[in-house]
Image: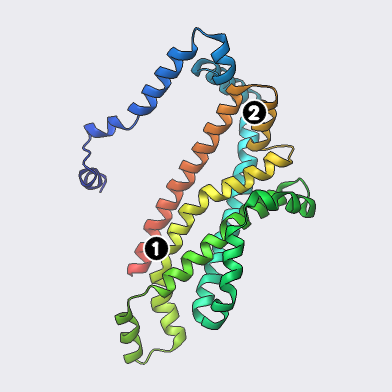
Amino acid sequence: TMNAKNEQTGLGKSGLLLYPLPLLLFVLIWHLLTDTSPERQFIFASPALVWAAFTKLVISGDLLKHTWVTISEAVLGFILGTTSGAFIGLFFWYFKTLAKVARPYVTALGTIPIFALAPMIIVWFGIGMWSKVMLAFLSTVAVAIVQSYQGATSIEPRFMRFMHVAGASRWQIFKLVVVPSSLIWVINAMRLNIGLALLGAFIGEFISAEEGLGYMIVKASGLYDMATVIVGIIALIVIALVLTAAIDLLERRLLRWRYR
């Protein structure tokens, strides 16, 4: 329960009030430092200017439009990268020789800076949605492969011995032991990939796009509109928090299936 979790972390109901305290303190200091200084407002904006920019973007519909574009690109790339990576990682467990051959290639894919691939991907797929989806895909697939394979190879040996003694086939071991035991690793990969998918979509929008939060931030920074830039950053943070909450909900459902 929530109370039990709060007790485990050392926070009771009153302790929950401590969560927004650092943010409120930061906003207060930010306001005091910029409220009476136009020069500082030009460089750092101010809470009032950010609120005004947020209100303007909401009323015009631009914030919703750009946010939806970035969510669509990041989520689609996240789903493609995480699911295909998880399947590939589990497939490698089934074929150990193939896993050894593919290992340096997966490592190379995971170490290439996505920013270096972005111009080439945009040339191949254009400046539309699919180039950003592919960048989000490439940002997430290597992590999912490594995590799922690591989970599949980290099963306790006693479980494997028990299945062999029971006369289980390799497919039965894979289905009844390997896949459920790898779930927690795949879920951890999903958590890591939320930020990576957003990063991939954002980089694509940053380099070449006509809509999206990355486009909005680049355009605003070119006009020295720091308030709009901060609104875009806050929107990215909110997206990440919402997606993380969705992963937490999915984790509870998957773990219940695993225990059954």
Residue type, mark 2 in image: Gly
- In which quadrant is the C terminus drawn? bottom left
In this view of the protein, which residue sits in the foreground, 72 or 87?
87
Visible residue check, residue 131: yes
Percent across and percent down for residue 60 are 65, 24
Percent across and percent down for residue 215 are 68, 35
Which residue in the structure is indicated by mark 1? 184
Q: Quadrant of residue 2?
A: top left
Instruction: State which mark lies toward you, 2 or 1.
Output: 1
Which comes sooner in the sequence, label 2 or label 1?
2
Percent across and percent down for residue 133 are 66, 52
Which residue in the structure is indicated by mark 2? 61
Visible residue check, residue 166: no
Label 2 crowding class (10 Å Cα cut-off): few <14, some 14-19, many 20+? few
Spatial CA distance of label 2 from label 1 is 39 Å
In the drawing, what numbered circle is on residue 230?
A: none
Q: Quadrant of residue 209?
A: top right
The residue lying at 36 percent from left, 92 percent from top is 167
Disc 2 secondary structure class: loop
Percent across and percent down for residue 13 are 23, 35
Q: Is residue 128 above or below residue 147?
A: above
The residue lying at 63 percent from left, 36 percent from top is 213
